[in-house]
Image (tube, rainbow, N blue to C red):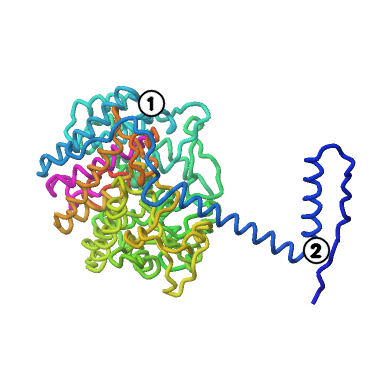
Amino acid sequence: MESIAVNHKPIVHVDYTDNSPLLTKRQTWRSLLRSKWYRFDRLTRGLFCLMFLMLGCALIARIFIEIEYPFGGKPDSQVTIPPRQDSDNHVAQTDKERRKAVRAAMKHAWQGYRQYAFGKDELQPVTNTSNNKWGGWGVTLIDALDTLHLMELHEEFKEGVHHVANLDFTKAKAGYTTPFFEMIIRSLGGLLSAYEMSLDVRLLHKAREIGDALMPAFDTPTGIPYPRVDVNKGKAVPASRVCIAEAGTVQLEYWKLSELTGNPVYHETAQKVVDLLDNAEKPYKGLYPIWVDINSGKLTSGSITFGGMGDSWYEYMIKQYIYSRREYDQYRRMYEESIDSMKELMVRRSIYDPEMYYVGDLDATATKFSPRYQHLTCFVPGMLALGSKVLDRPDDLELAKQLTYTCFQMYNRTATGLSPEYIQFRNKRDQGLSESTENGMFALLSLRKASEKEKEDGFYLGPNRSYILRPEALESIMIMYRITGDKMYKEWGWQIFQAIEKWTKTPSANSAYHDVTSTAGSSQWTDSMESFFLAETLKYLYLLFSPAEYYSLDEYVFNTEAHPFKIMRHARP
Ligand code: DMJ
């Protein structure tokens, strides 16, 4: 065995003639420590360093979880505006009353936007300022139009249409490049659906203007779109990759545009993307890693997820099948392949609450499982329920019920009744998949002992505990109610609506909430209201309390931004 080398370093000679006693003391200590430290060989010193580093990390992780984000909420900081009283909303018991309450919420948010941000992209609902981070065409206004119409807010709708009619979608502020997917799902989708509701032809003209302005996105070696377009130059911004949700969630909108204008080019161009990805090599049947190489058309890397960046790619398989009157069998096949593999590899349940099923994420090779459930993934139960009806897959409806339960508990089991961006589960070694290390720090955290709270809830929370007014859980709740007729879903939706009213309502509109485990109220407002709150969240709530024939799922298919499109009359011209 190698002997421990002593005194590798020269001994530091301390000058005791120095007048400064403090300096002398420090130097003595230093030299003593140094001489001790260098008694160890290099390997041992290295191991010590590694140990200290790991201890440091563990400590930080611990502090992070226990102090900065204690489960169950930070101690309340100063509340400047008291939260609304529960009694404000408990009175509404009938569907009619609840619909009225949701309509009032829409009116409130719209009025704040109208007063402080009309024509701007977003209202900042705490400071009552605005931003133009989506190109400055007023994305909130465009996204909200069909909700206004559907809630019979006709004066507001008219005013909105008048504004849109005067916009020019071929011009943006200098240097701004438009995110292709977002503009398609929010603005093109919004205008097409508002046109179908009102038959105001100005809306169709503007829809076509957007559609044309963004078509250069497809000018790539493979036809797979670039993610951004410079409408001022009439060109896309070259890029090497795009995520699958961005490339594969524009087809429904372009198809509707073809149907309404009689020009097949929109649909044909967008359809080529699906054909290419359908034929691309995949790590597992029906599962697509999120990154697509635009130049080769290959699925390159990234996770496999039904959450952010993957989600609506899968959603549009079944929706296009429905939209095409079930005539495009390609979409049925793709959907069934994806859902079968998702069920095989990506669905698990909580160790502590066996009722709680969730869809986790996989790595690009489909061999490592990441046990978290994103709020974004909560659209899945609604999708499964639709698919179960259309394709007669009764098992999918059972899974949809279990997943909706988890989505509801994401709200129900926090102090505010709002849901965080995602929840985490403890890994269980099964299904032949190894544990994912993708979550880095969180893999480490999941090694700690489960708290009583986690055992009760069935899940634990990551660092992002914000609720940004997202719609997915309510989307599924609405669809589940319509498909099963189970009134429990209405109660769940109503409970979530009350939490939204209580914690996110500002004097002018609604704000995203920083930490759903904190009951601090207004100090948690982040001064942001994304357009999907008006386009989706409030619309799905309103439909939940409306008769099932109102925008019936037999006649309409909703785009991923909740814009209802009439199912086409004839699938093939
Ligand atoms: C919406 O813009 C769309 O639903 C999109 O597909 C992903 N999610 C956001 C809202 O959460």
**Residue 39: mark:** 2
> Is 419 on the left-hand or right-hand side of 46?
left
Q: Position of residue 335 (x, y in %)?
A: 33, 62
Could you classify mark 1 by the number of other residues whose Cα lies within 10 Å: few (under 14), some (14-19), or many (20 or more)? Answer: few
Residue that appears at 50% across and 62% down? 364
> Is 141 on the left-hand or right-hand side of 51?
left
**Above or below, 349 relative to 409:** below
Residue that appears at 31% across and 24% down? 163
Q: Position of residue 261 (x, y in %)?
A: 30, 39
Inspect the image, locate mark 2, and give the three-letter code of the amino acid beneath it.
Arg
What residue sits right under mark 1 in the picture? 127
Q: Earlier in the sequence, mark 2 or mark 1?
A: 2
Alpha carbons under labels 2 and 1: distance apart: 62 Å
**Above or below, 262 relative to 379:** above
- Residue situated in front as seen by the camera: 137 or 207: 137
Answer whether residue 534 is magenta in the image: yes
Residue 7 is at least partly visible in this image: yes
> In which quadrant is the N terminus drawn?
bottom right
Q: Are marks 2 and 1 in contact (CB under 8 Å)?
A: no
- Residue situated in front as seen by the camera: 271 or 67: 67
> Is 442 on the left-hand or right-hand side of 420?
right
Q: Position of residue 385 (x, y in %)?
A: 24, 59
Which type of secondary structure does the marked residue at label 1 adopt?
A: loop
Residue that appears at 26% across and 49% down? 475
- Residue situated in front as seen by the camera: 204 or 432: 432
- Segment tinted magenta in the rendering: 528-557
Residue that appears at 36% across and 55% down? 377
Answer whether residue 359 is magenta in the image: no
**Residue 246: mark:** none
Inspect the image, locate mark 1, and give the three-letter code of the amino acid beneath it.
Thr
